Image (cartoon, grey):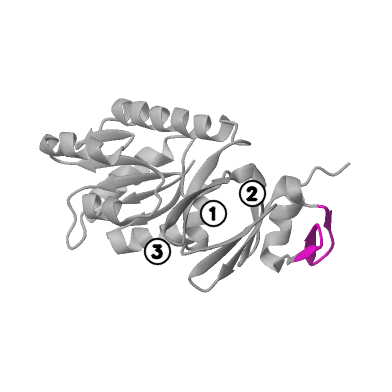
Amino acid sequence: MNCILVDDDPFSRKVLSDLVAQTEILHLVTACSTAMEAINVLNTEQVDLMLLDIEMPEISGFDLLSNLESKPLVILITGHEQFAARAFEYNVTDYLVKPIEFARFSKAINRAHDLYKQALTVPSTHASFYIKVSGSLVKLNQSDILWIEALENYMTINTINEKYTVHFTMKSLEDKLPSQEFLRVHRSYIVRKDKIDSISDDEIRIGKDRIPVGRTYKKELNKNINLL
């Protein structure tokens, strides 16, 4: 799992970094000293797990969780036990009190890893979500989506029968869609893998529509196609 740790204390960051380094199933993307640093990382990197200190200046761990549109698995870390009840209101995976022993840390990581694996294996062919259209909530089946295009602060979701424009960011929508079924092929486009009809050097065809393939996304696209 890709993880980040967020703690304003340099000593705590060092301790947590060492614990992560001893854990084979974790890859440390970066260590952040502020919540704002963490937000920037979450918006640009694939993060599966966040080790988050609660007590930080300016923006606390709770404030960070409250302001995230979508979040990875979270293990909260603090020097005080009194935050435990409030912590689980945020649907966190676990709650660790400093000083953290390796055995307790491993137990929390294994719990997070189990949830991570469950999310990867849950079939989502018939999964759905709701989008707001003209003041109403419309149910959208993921299996009906063909491709998605980013237009400034809006997203156009193209389905088999309809086209919807929603106020969403590319990153937050990408996080909500299962990676085993959807693939980002351009900074402005996400496609559903099983809807692809053909692929050339710089574009994908889905029916009569042509979707550009960004240079930096070609390698990932090639890894995701079932080539005989």
Q: Nearer the viewer, mark 3 or mark 2?
A: 2
Give yes or no for residue 200 being in the magenta stretch: yes
| Percent x, y of residue 119 | 51, 34
SS for dot 3? helix
- Disc 2 element: strand
Residue marked by disc 2: 182
In the image, the segment drawn in magenta is 197-210
How far from the left and from the top, in percent, is residue 207?
81, 57
Circles 2 and 1, Cβ within 8 Å, touching? The answer is: yes
Q: Cβ–Cβ below 8 Å for labels 3 and 2?
A: no
Q: Which residue is mark 3?
A: 40
Q: Earlier in the sequence, mark 2 or mark 1?
A: 1
Quarter of the image for residue 191 reads bottom right
Q: Is residue 88 magenta?
A: no
Q: Tell how many labels.
A: 3
- Tell me what residue is drawn at x 22 percent, y 39 percent: 87
Give the amino acid type for the residue marked by disc 2 in the picture: Phe
Which image quadrant is residue 85 in?
top left
Q: CA distance from mark 1 to mark 3?
A: 16 Å
Q: Residue at x 50, y 45 (%)?
A: 129
Please give the residue where the numbered disc 1 appears in the rendered image. Answer: 174
The C terminus lies in quadrant: top right
Q: Is residue 224 visible?
A: no
Element assignment for label 1: helix
Q: In the rendered structure, which amino acid carries the disc numbered 3?
A: Asn
> In the rendered structure, are the residues bearing label 1 and label 3 in contact, judged by CB atoms less than 8 Å apart?
no
* 161 lies above or below 153: above
Closer to viewer: mark 1 or mark 3:
1
First-in-chain label (1 vs 3): 3
In the visual, does 51 lie left or right of 84? right
